[in-house]
Image (tube, rainbow, N blue to C red):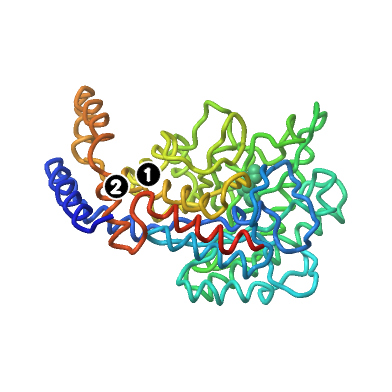
Amino acid sequence: MKEEYITSAYRAAQARFQELGVDTEAAMAQLAQTPISMHCWQGDDVRGFESPDVALSGGIQATGNFPGAAKTPVQLRADMEQAFAMIPGKKRINLHAIYLDSEEKVERDQLEPKHFASWVEWAKQQQIGLDFNPTLFSHPLADDGFTLSHPDEKVRQFWIDHVKVCRQISAYFGKELGTPSVMNIWIPDGMKDQTFDRLAPRQRLLAALDEAISEKFDTKYHIDAVESKLFGIGAEAYTVGSNEFYMGYAATRGTALCLDAGHFHPTEVISDKITACSLYIPHLLLHVTRPVRWDSDHVVAFDDETQAIMREIVRNQLQDRVSIGLDFFDASINRIAAWVIGTRNAQKALLKALLEPTATLKRAEQSFDYTTRLALLEENHSQPWNAVWDYFCWKNGAPVGQEWLPLVKDYEATVLAAR
Ligand code: RNT
Ligand code: ZN
């Protein structure tokens, strides 16, 4: 797109926002320093590099067979670099333990920082931070549907040890990269059908987690997070790590709490949970995703809930206490495009939130002037925020509008098709 269109549209938009007392330069500065943690697992349908023939388990599913999924760490990093080139602003990468880079097979309770050294080297080159996840699924010892809450002590211990070694790796990321790694613990544990004893697995999970996170780490390097869920495929009747379970856990243990947008009842939204949780829990991690009828992990859209999530962070100045992560895995479309669409949508929503006339809206609400509140909120949707977005992309060397699409298609034809 022509530079003059972008800049003249921006100047006009800037003036419109100024009338409302909104500083577009300040909004762009905030956007530029708020990282979005892009999840590596969109690049290969959550397969990882542990073994080429292991099936995804744990009640989650990537559907579709679009060609060109990354099969090696080198391919995955190349794909992520392509996506990065289309995404303005600050990025992080979120890794799972199954994305180790090792010639030999390594059991999950034996993982070490050295198995992720190439990732750290790459992150340094890219000047990004890393986040981490132990992988408590897609493994024979998870096949019973239980991991940290497994009735067999030996199985439980294996997973406790896995979480322990993952915390070392996470802290290593934090130390090497100078930014804390948020390590999210999600387990698939649950039951398919009517559950007789709903307490004992939760008691076991509580004890297992306490043991797994007993070593103290400086939060400069490593932050533990726990992620609740409502149900999974094959765990429809009972989930050990429910919302109440982890809400209490995070509040009493001081860990971060992960809110995944697809992990609640369909009429519940995580945007309304952020402020309530922030009163009791020091740090929140978000898994921004799009549930379609179920926890389907569709690519993040520029929809009402994504916008509402970002507004809650911005309106309450929670940027330093909320880590924004993405969590979707669509194998039916170009995987790089999926990253680009989802990440840019999260950033657009964030920018739109940063361009609200905060002071005026607060004043209107406090003085019961709900007419002004509704009027401004609705007018706000058609403010020229997109001109600010285009300008932000252009200034940061990222494609403007749909200009990124032919670039991704070209990579698809030249690189992905040859895999
Ligand atoms: C599963 C959770 C979890 C996973 C990733 C791969 O329902 O959302 O966050 O999606 O760890
Ligand atoms: Zn999630």
| Residue 111 rendering spot, x and y as whole percentages | 73, 69
Q: Nearer the viewer, residue 56 or 260?
A: 56
Horizontal side of residue 15 vs 82, given as left or right: left
Front-lying residue, 379 or 159: 379
Q: Is residue 388 above or below residue 415?
A: above
Residue 133's spot in the image, x, y percent? 63, 58
Residue 64 figure quarter: top right
| Percent position of residue 335, x then y | 57, 52
154 w.r.t. 121: above or below: above
Q: Which mark is residue 299?
A: none
Mark 2 and mark 1 lie on one chain; the one further toward the N terminus is 1
Identify the residue at horizontal 70%, vertical 67% (top origin): 165
**Residue 178 drawn above or below residue 132:** below
* Residue type of the residue flagged with mark 1: Ala
Q: CA distance from mark 2 to mark 1?
A: 9 Å
Which residue sits at x=47%, y=68%?
A: 128
Is the CB atom of the residue marked by disc 1 within 8 angstroms of ligand 2's nearest atom?
Answer: no
Q: Which residue is mark 2?
A: 354
Element on which disc 1 rests: helix
Q: Residue at x 38, y 41 (%)?
A: 312
Nearest-to-viewer mark from 2 and 1: 1
Q: Which residue is mark 1?
A: 349
Front-lying residue, 348 or 359: 348
Label 2 SS? helix
